[in-house]
Image (spheres, rainbow, N blue to C red):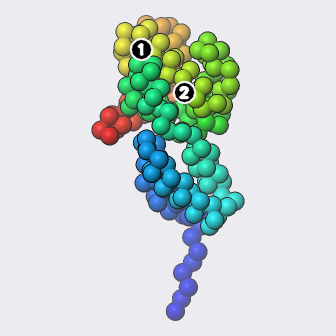
Amino acid sequence: MALKKAPTHAQALAGLEKIEVYYFARLKSAQDREAQEEVQKYLARLCRTNPNSAYLAALKTACQFDYALIPKVAAEIGLELALLQAVIETESGYNPNAISRAGAVGLMQLMPATAERFGVTDRYDAAQSLYGGARYLRYLLKLFNNDLKLAIAAYNAGEGNVRKYGNQIPPFRETQDYVVKVMQLYKAYQRY
């Protein structure tokens, strides 16, 4: 009998991702203790099998965040939950420790000036980032007369750039792709 060749690191990660999709999706939408506990048990099993995995480290970081806070903040700030979830997923992948090349930090990827403007003193603090980013998004929606695509573009490129281009989505490939991605996720989250 021939032995099967061990999977490459990339193949192993791809396999883990497929398995993990169910659990991580459940965690992101979980508002009950049972679901949170189920995901934490799954994570503990992964830790025992491969404690030094970079993928696992990223997953553990994301799982430390209390996802039940998202619907609470959405309701308090007056945002549609699906929109807030779509922006979070696009900005940081639900990672409160995410850092962008441009210097944006945290769950909602706030730049220093934006964080200060919306009362965030610690951009790595998931709750502060969530509240600050949600307030900023609500502000952008009001500024652009509830035009969802313009508000999303402004979240990515800055409100000044949206104004500069005549209240249109700026002609930056990154921003155009960002708007498309957020809108796709927004529609997907609306179904749940």
Name the residue tied to disc 2: 130
Q: Residue 146, position in %: x, y? A: 36, 13
Q: Residue at x 58, y 29 (%)?
A: 127
Residue type marked 2: Leu
The quarter of the picture where residue 41 lies is bottom right
Name the residue tied to disc 1: 141
Q: Residue at x 43, y 31 (%)?
A: 71
Disc with the residue nearer the chain's start (2 vs 1): 2
Local secondary structure at mark 1: helix
The quarter of the picture where residue 79 lies is top left
Can residue 36 be seen here? The reply is yes
- Residue extending furthest front? 33
Residue type marked 1: Leu
Q: Nearer the viewer, mark 2 or mark 1?
A: 2
* Depth check, front residue: 43 or 17: 43
* Residue 152 located left or right of residue 56: left
